[in-house]
Image (cartoon, helix red, strand yellow):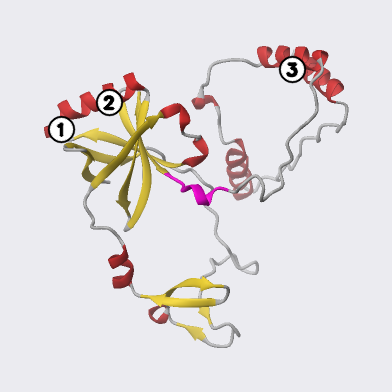
Amino acid sequence: MWNGAIAFGSVTVPVKVFAATDPRSLSMRELHAADGAPLAHRYFDPDGEREISSEKVVRGAEVSEGRFVVLSSEELKAADRPKRRAVEIEAFVPEQEIDPIYWDRAYNLAPQPEGQDAYAVLLAALARTRRSGIGRVVLRSRERLVTVRASGSTLRMHTMRFHDELVKGATVKLAATTRRTGRAEMDIAKTLIGQLAGPYEPAKLKDTYRERVEKLARSKLAGKPARLRRRPAPERTDDLLEALKASLAGSR
């Protein structure tokens, strides 16, 4: 993606940034039902009577409900920090204190030729101290909060969500449970977890929904009838102990 650096204190570690993920979402388009032609999105005024050309579309910040202030590209750039191609580390924090809910997209960081030694030292230091660097970097014209951590023999960078982007528990009224767990329930639950215990093997976790939809599309293209069979929903029960027993029997 780009060449830059990790910077903290007086230390600069030259790195190359590469995307670490390749989203495999389904490629879907909106089509005209009559002839299957792809549809285009166009801009219209609020009344839907007058089409607006893309050249006359501007961006505005909503400062209160229904009230906008138009901001030009130059003004937005002025609000950004200088585009230094560096991850500016602000703190090194215990990695176990970072809730994965804050992580967004992942990137791999590779050393540039002149930064091999510094890269190796930072990688080893993060691994041994079990700490991750928290900092900021400009990606695609926007400042992002990021974490840099050791992952095996590689430094990995994750863009992060800000704290005020998380949905608070009080907002969705998550009530704290006051129910006490019975011994029989706990014994069966622990047995069930033990039977399903195993190593984390991400390569075995397939996107089965995408695979089924793609198979359905290929079948229809070949003129084969689609077989739409849904799995029967499991019987619902309010008896937790009975549900645990049924799950245990099923896992066996």
Q: Helix, strand or loop at disc 3? A: helix
Relative to 193, say whether 114 is above or below: below
In the rendered image, residue 105, in percent from the top left (x then y), is placed at: 42, 43
Q: Is residue 247 left or right of residue 215?
A: right
Image disc number at residue 250: none
Callout 1 crowding tier (Cα within 10 Å): few <14, some 14–19, many ≥20 = some
Residue pictured at 54% horizontal, 69% vertical: 39
Q: Helix, strand or loop at disc 2? A: helix
Callout 2 crowding tier (Cα within 10 Å): few <14, some 14–19, many ≥20 = many
Relative to 20, say whether 47 is above or below: below
What is the C-alpha distance between the residues marked 1 and 2?
12 Å
**Residue bearing the label numbered 3:** 189
**Nearer to us in this view, 86 or 248:** 86
**Residue bearing the label numbered 2:** 123
Given the image, on which type of amino acid does mark 2 rest? Leu
Q: Mark 1 touching mark 3, by CB under 8 A?
A: no
Residue pictured at 76% horizontal, 12% vertical: 187
Count of numbered circles on the image: 3
Given the image, on which type of amino acid does mark 1 rest? Gly
Q: Is residue 21 left or right of residue 241?
A: left
Residue pictured at 42% horizontal, 78% vertical: 57
Give the mark nearer the N terminus: 3 vs 2. Answer: 2
Question: Magenta segment, which residues?
Answer: 160-166
Given the image, on which type of amino acid does mark 3 rest? Ala
**Residue bearing the label numbered 1:** 115
